[in-house]
Image: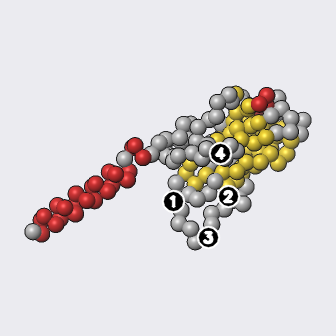
Amino acid sequence: MRHLTKLVGTGLILLTVTACGGPETMATAPGAPSGTTATTPPSAPGKPQLHLPPGRTPVADGQVDGTALPQDFPRQVYTADGGRTITLRAEEGGCQHALGQAVEQTAQRVVLDLSETKAQTGQMCTMDLRYPYISVPLSAPLGGRAVVLKQSTPR
């Protein structure tokens, strides 16, 4: 009887682990560092999305300055709407969501500030990282201006 209890218990644990962690419940975000996973993306416009929206043109790597970002932070930048919208890969985790804002726009450069929303206190959150795309409107087309990426604390 004791062995039957152990057998049934072990079977239930294996069933739970395979049901919760199977590959069909997780998907790697395209362009994200390996080993990261993503959940279903929000579908509302202007919200972070896990897939690059159609019609985006990559910005040349030499035009993007991501030196102020942490070493493993994504630096993928795209334009749309004739250069009036910048779409870029951001980083978010747990209950927080990625935010992006153009904080400076001159004839030479556009400075984009990346941050996250603050998690509500007392709320349980997962400790995962996601790499969604966020879009930031510009007052004028990007053209040949440099894109400077910086990161601020959650707001």
Asked if residue 113 shows in the view, the reply is yes
- Please state which of the two labelled residues, at mark 2 or mark 4, is closer to the viewer: 4
Whole-angstrom CA distance, mark 1 to mark 3, is 14 Å
Q: Quadrant of residue 61?
A: top right
Residue 37: where, in percent of width, then height? 49, 46
> Residue pushed farthest front?
44
Whole-angstrom CA distance, mark 2 to mark 4, is 17 Å
Q: Looking at numbered disc 4 in the image, what kind of residue is underneath it?
A: Ala
Under tag 1, what secondary structure? loop
Q: Which tag, 2 or 4, sits closer to the chain's start?
A: 4
Whole-angstrom CA distance, mark 1 to mark 4, is 22 Å
Whole-angstrom CA distance, mark 3 to mark 4, is 25 Å
Name the residue located 12 percent from the left edge and 69 percent from the top edge: 2
Residue 105 versus residue 18 in the image, above or below: above
Residue named by callout 2: 117
Residue named by callout 4: 44
**Picture disc at residue 126:** 1
Q: Looking at numbered disc 3 in the image, what kind of residue is underneath it?
A: Thr
Whole-angstrom CA distance, mark 1 to mark 2, is 15 Å
Query: In screen coordinates, is 49 left or right of 126?
Result: right
Q: Looking at numbered disc 1 in the image, what kind of residue is underneath it?
A: Thr
Q: Are marks 1 and 3 in contact (CB under 8 Å)?
A: no
Asked if residue 90 shows in the view, the reply is no
Residue named by callout 3: 121
Q: Residues within 10 Å of mark 4 (few under 14, many from 20)?
A: few
Residue 43: where, in percent of width, then height? 61, 44
